[in-house]
Image (spheres, grey):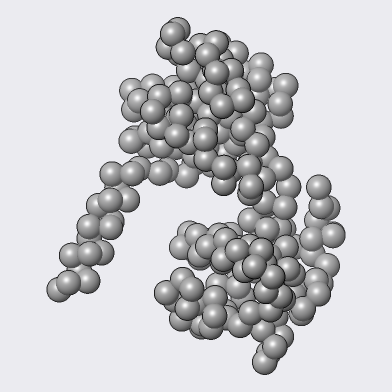
Amino acid sequence: MMSDSERSKKLPGGTRPIPPGTANPNVPVATVTRLALYLRELQQLHRSGLQRIQSGAIAKRLGLNDSQVRRDLSCFGQFGQRGVGYSIPALTQAIQAILGTDRSWNVILIGAGNLGRALSGYRGFDQQGFRLVGVFDCVEDKIGSKLGGLTIQSLDDLEAVVEKESVELAILAVPASSAASVAQRLEIAGVTGLLNFAPVSVRKPGSSLTVVDVDLAVELQRLAFAVVNQKN
């Protein structure tokens, strides 16, 4: 794992990210989302053998404008060289450090239903440094069966696995009726980040648990709104 001092050093290609933990905490969620998209595109370009790229080329691939790309990156440090562009390996490394994916994260999944099974098979998690180390469910018929390379465990074992595997992140794919209670157990057990697929908010006042909600129905509503307003 990189130390903070190693991450903050100037990288090749004129790239000097802000040391982790010192970036503006008020950076919009949309900016962080685009940063993850930039990383995805850079990784694809690097695999194709490309070494340098201009902001305009990144923007074109994502349907943005180049000034948006430059503004987003400027929230996190100095990147690239005027007239030369960005070193793809250096910018990739810098964005990974900003997003925290330059290290491995142990993750658990709660809920082995249809959605949970689909999520457990997503290869992108492992490719980006998220290692699934446990799957849990409360349905007796599922407990003990295999899901990928893991055995589905009882929720009774949740706290022990979180401690043993030093789990920091969890994915919640359970019915709305049980989401809040499971989220509370995760926080008490020491989990600090939760990706919540349950169609209900699990945030509690004063909670230290960081929650990102992913409601697929809400995302489709956003898409429908965008399509309707594009036509008008």
Q: Is residue 116 visible?
A: yes
Image point 48% across, 73% down: which residue? Answer: 61
Quadrant the C terminus occupies: bottom left
Where is 97 relative to 143, above or below?
below
Looking at this rendering, what residue extends furthest in the front direction? Answer: 48
Image point 52% across, 14% down: which residue? Answer: 145
Where is 117 relative to 34, above or below?
above
Q: Position of residue 208 (x, y in %)?
A: 56, 37
Where is 95 relative to 221, above or below?
below
- In the foreground, 171 or 22: 171
Q: Position of residue 39 (x, y in %)?
A: 60, 63
Looking at this rendering, what residue extends furthest in the bottom direction? Answer: 83
Image point 28% across, 58% down: which residue? Answer: 223
Q: Position of residue 131 (x, y in %)?
A: 65, 36
Q: Position of residue 24 (x, y in %)?
A: 61, 64
Looking at this rendering, what residue extends furthest in the top direction? Answer: 140
- 86 to the left or right of 153: right
Q: Is residue 24 visible?
A: no
